[in-house]
Amino acid sequence: MSQILVAFYLLLMLGAGWRLFGMSWSRVAKAGAGILLVCPLPMLFLLPALIHPERPLADILRGLGLAILACGTLCLLGGMAVAWVRARRV
């Protein structure tokens, strides 16, 4: 079940990046919206690990949160790249 949720999150970020690039917002607004889209799920893992680093699984939570943050960012940027290539092709 957890693998399905992670895959769904990454596909959601890919689609969000694609749709976000298609909007006629400024780059600052797109970057802010992208940060707000990517950060909530990794923060569920990072915040407990950063608040209580002495707990036994804090290092695993921190690593998992950073990995999800990096993968979500890459998927969002990948969606933006797909939209950019598609817009240039037309």
Image (spheres, rainbow, N blue to C red):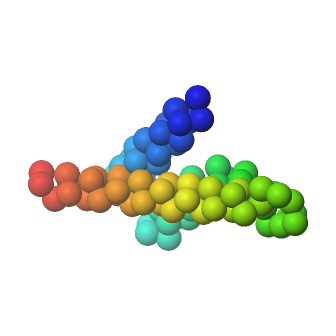
User: Could you tell me residue 29's position as x and y percent?
Assistant: 51, 64
Question: At x 50% / y 55%, what residue is drawn?
Answer: 72
Residue at image position (41%, 54%) is 75
- Looking at the image, the residue that sits furthest to the bottom is 28
For image coordinates 72% across by 51% down, the residue present is: 44
Image height of 26 relative to 82, above or below: below
Residue 2 point in image, percent of width and height: 59, 35
In the picture, measured across the screen, residue 49 lies left or right of residue 88, that is right
Q: Residue furthest top?
A: 1
Quadrant (top left/top right/bottom left/bottom right) for the N terminus: top right
In the rendered image, the residue lying farthest to the left is: 89
Q: Is residue 1 above or below residue 66?
A: above
- Most extreme residue toward the front, as rendered? 56
Q: Nearer the viewer, residue 61 or 12?
A: 61
Residue 17 position (above or below residue 32)? above
Q: Residue at x 34, y 56 (%)?
A: 78
| Left or right placement of residue 37 versus residue 43 in this view | left
Q: Is residue 22 visible?
A: yes
- x%, y% of residue 22? 34, 52
Q: Quadrant of residue 66?
A: bottom right
Q: Is residue 56 above or below residue 13?
A: below
Q: Position of residue 25 (x, y in %)?
A: 44, 60
Q: How many marks?
A: 0
Q: Can residue 43 be seen in the rendering of this structure?
A: no
Give residue 76's quadrant in the image.
bottom left
* Horizontal side, residue 49 vs residue 11: left or right: right
